[in-house]
Amino acid sequence: MTRFILVALDGLRPDMVSAAATPHLAALAASGTRFANARSVFPSETRVATPSLITGCRPGGHGMVANTLFDAGVAPDRLLRTKLVADVLAMAQGMAQGAESPLERPSLAERLAPHGLSFALVSAGTAGAARLLHPAAERLGSFRWNVEDEEGETARLVRDRLGPTPPHAVPNLPRLHHAARVMLEIVLPEHRPDVTLLWLSEPDIAFHWGGLRSAEAQAGLRAADDVLGEIVAWRDAQPDAEDIAIIVLSDHGHVTGRGKLSLRDELCRAGFRAGAGLGEGIDIAVAPAAAPGLWFRDPSLAPQVAAFLAEQDWAGPLLARDPAILPQGQAVPLSLLGSGHRRSADLVVTFAGSEASDEWGLPGFAPFDAPDVPEGGGMHGGLHRSELATVLVMQGGPFRDGAVAQMPADLTDIVPTILHLMGLDQQGMEGRPLLAGWDAAADALPLRERVSLPGGFVLEAMRATPEGRLYPTALRRCG
């Protein structure tokens, strides 16, 4: 049976992959199958993307709807930040006493375990994201390690063997290389999992803080590519190398942030009582993001907010958990994007970006709301073309050599592909096996379509079949 090694390069735009910038990834893509129409989910944020990858479902199915969100039943006076394990577990407890995860679909590890198959995670990202990628590690007795882990048997094992985890840096090179050592010296040779995921936090961190082609970003991207090269070299040296496939992915792209603002402050200046929760004197909880969420104490306030936003040149179309919160035709249902869930915001605000070149010569920039990201830093979470496009390469094992697959794909299709090749059931997943990875006859050009949105915008999208799921491609102004 084929074993799988997944390597995630957080935030990598596919148009930044080249022989010069990412030689190992470029070589792997040339010798495997590259999916030219791979996309993220919406919102295109890491802790929405990671559950979508690991459950094979979009946010409306698994229930993790934003990096930062509001849930009155869990924390009525503040926002929940899913990078924190404590907040992830608080959401789980909000579902059921003793629950280990807020996800409403089983993870890959939970699907493998009944068949005697194993999953391991090595993560250089946040502890919250690692928990969402492998929520059942303790119960299943399987390997999960994150660079932020300090307590627990696995953290002690890694510390005893490899020394303490280096401190966070920008770019995060020491932690990247430490995670690679955990993977190459402990997990792959000693545990030999059937499926292993290595999550690399670069180039995302350097993109955010330095800009997409800054010296920091180039260093972060090269380091992540070097780690990939080490993984490939390890695989190629194994006696069963032909039975080990490598899948490289990114969870989202990046767009240059231009026009930083605080939606909460803008609403307050307009006379609304907005805050970071629905405490006393607050009518609107606002979660900052590239697609900020708004939760209303009284939904009758929504039309007034929508009227204000319609006058702002930085605002794009509104998305809604229930479009009836606004007059007909003023909001797009989140369910169109597979993102409607009871946890979803009442309204989600999009920003009006541009596809013109940024200061780095790359296509795309957009306004954003992120307190910690500087003006000109990389940003993601919205529906800009550069945020939604992702890297997806499958190489080795059963995958075709030197192929470019045109079929639509997103993060939810990766685990169904793995399970299909293992002969396991994918019931309950929204994603589908990407048959074009090994069968050229199964490939087909996507069916393109355009969805008209309020305010003079259009959503470009694609489907695999006329009745198939919608894969969003880009939000842009008409004309």
Image (cartoon, grey):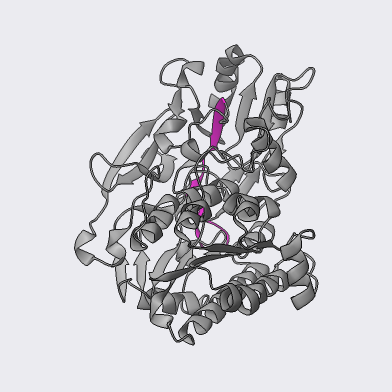
Q: Is residue 379 left or right of residue 73?
A: left
- Which residue is at 34% across, 41% downward? 470
Quarter of the image where one finds residue 102: top right
- Which residue is at 24% across, 60% downward? 443
For residue 393, above or below residue 97: below
Is residue 1 or residue 415 the one in the foreground?
Answer: 1
- Which residue is at 49% across, 81% downward? 235
Q: Residue furthest left?
A: 441
Q: Is residue 350 left or right of residue 479?
A: right
Q: Is residue 365 visible?
A: no
Q: Position of residue 468 (x, y in %)?
A: 28, 42
Quarter of the image where one finds residue 349: top right
Q: Quadrant of the C terminus?
A: top left
Is residue 229 or residue 92 the one in the foreground?
Answer: 92
The residues colored magenta run 346-365
Magenta-drawn stretch, dominant element (helix, strand or loop): strand
**Residue 350 highlighted magenta (yes or no):** yes
Q: Is residue 330 left or right of residue 470?
A: right
- Which residue is at 78% across, 17% downward? 281
Q: Position of residue 362 (x, y in %)?
A: 50, 61
Q: Is residue 304 visible?
A: yes
For residue 345, above or below residue 365: above
For residue 61, above or below residue 390: above
Q: Quadrant of the N terminus?
A: bottom left
**Residue 30 highlighted magenta (yes or no):** no
Q: Position of residue 169 (x, y in %)?
A: 76, 66
Q: Position of residue 173 (x, y in %)?
A: 69, 72
